[in-house]
Amino acid sequence: MSTLTKRWTRRDMLKSTLALAGCGLVPGAALGLDGTTAANERVTMALIGCGGQGRGDMSNFLGFPDFQVIACCDVVRDHFLAAKRQVDGRYGNSDCETTYDYRDIAHREDIDTVLIATPDHWHENISIYCMKYGKDVYCEKPETLTINAGKRMREAVNRFNRVFSGGSQRVWQDYQGIHKLVRAGVLGEVKEGWANVWGASGEFDLPAQETPEGVDWDRWCGPTVWHPFNQTLIKGGFRPYRDYSGGGTTDWGCHTFGGIMFAMDLQDTGPVEINPPSVTGKGNLTFVFANGFKMHHGGGWDGVINLRGTEGDISEKDMREGKYQIPDIYIPNYHGGADTIYRDFANCVRTRQKPFRNIERAHRTATCAHLGNIAYWLDRTIHWDPVAEEIVGDPEAALMMDRAKRAPYII
């Protein structure tokens, strides 16, 4: 029986205790009689990855009366202690539990959901393991380190019937004006788009430093290649290194590629051809979709997203500064009237609907970014079949769709 199912059973049992509350034997607040959410009807959550991004994401859930964070996990002691202080400060107690090992979180039956904000190379393992043990997952972007990791995560979502939300809040919250302008036909037929974000990650080159007390460094490296400790990595500086991340292509690319693909209603497919700068001859990489639309990485003129149509252009910066009249049209987005991606996930945990950034959309966007990196790293055109989800006619490139995992950190 799932934790959520248990919660509904407990709710039924509470009906017989309402009279006791009236006699003062049970605090009314515990039953939600003061207008708050009764404690046993709250969705419980644990944070896994307690750095700055994780604690920032967590602050959103701490503001929800129907959610309660009860545990924090990180391989850096200072990180989970900072998260614990944040949680305990919010609830006015010292109840938040801490651990170095995410499996401690997964095995707890009193935890319904997990917020995963670790470095990218841990997203797959933790997501799948927690879903196996009945947790719904909110996972920061980029959700995957490789293309095949996304396939496995999608399979786990379906196999274990879990709610999974990717973590790009910008695709709808920041860029919805762009989507409405495009889908209302204001630009005519849109032919090209530009995502102006930094590029692919590279090889590891940091000097070795002594591992400080309170850091489980082997577990931080986890399933990827082991490198000597360097404090840059535990302070958010891991993205330039290919062993841990795809760099800006996957980081901000999941926002911007995702935003462009959603505007063009291509969020559930992918490109058919990816050409690096040496092939385009224009200094930027280009994704070509089956309908002829071209999405360029870099080379735009203003802001992080630009789109060009037969009737005009859109600059994300100009849109953000209010220089466009946004059409009043409805595009399906967050569920239950949610105004943030965090509330969208929270609502979907209760309704069992697919969140706006469900696993398919998160995986498709990340796949696009990974294909761009493969084209950069090999410096040649990559042909992609978005239906079969396979690289066509290039065995070397196809091998880069996955990576071996370091023992014992194997799913």
Image (tube, rainbow, N blue to C red):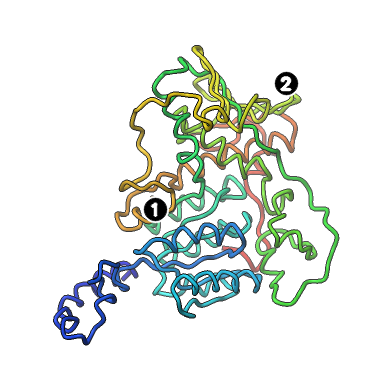
* Crowd rating for badge 1 (residues with CA inside 10 Å; few <14, some 14–19, many 20+): some
User: Which quarter of the rendering shows the C terminus?
Assistant: bottom right
* Crowd rating for badge 2 (residues with CA inside 10 Å; few <14, some 14–19, many 20+): few
Q: Quadrant of residue 43?
A: bottom left
Residue at the top extreme, as displayed: 310
User: Which quarter of the rendering shows the N terminus?
Assistant: bottom left
Q: Position of residue 242 (x, y in %)?
A: 72, 49
Q: Position of residue 281 (x, y in %)?
A: 74, 20
Q: Position of residue 357 (x, y in %)?
A: 45, 45
**Is 128 displayed left or right of 241 in the figure?**
left
Q: Residue at x 51, y 42 (%)?
A: 170
Residue at the right extreme, as displayed: 207
**Identity, as a three-letter code, of the amino acid under mark 2:** Lys
- For residue 185, above or below residue 44: above
| Residue closer to the observer: 280 or 80 | 80
Q: Residue at x 53, y 60 (%)?
A: 116
- For residue 66, above or below residue 214: above
Per the image, label 2 sits on a secondary structure element best described as: loop
Which residue is denoted by mark 1 in the rendering? 343
Q: Residue at x 41, y 70 (%)?
A: 111
Disc ID at residue 203: none
Number of the front mark, 2 or 1: 1
Q: Residue at x 57, y 76 (%)?
A: 99
**Identity, as a three-letter code, of the amino acid under mark 1:** Arg
Which residue is denoted by mark 2 in the rendering? 282
Per the image, label 1 sits on a secondary structure element best described as: helix
Q: Position of residue 97 (x, y in %)?
A: 51, 77
Disc 2 or 1, which lies upstream in sequence?
A: 2
Q: CA distance from mark 2 to mark 1?
A: 41 Å
**Is 71 displayed left or right of 80 in the figure?**
left
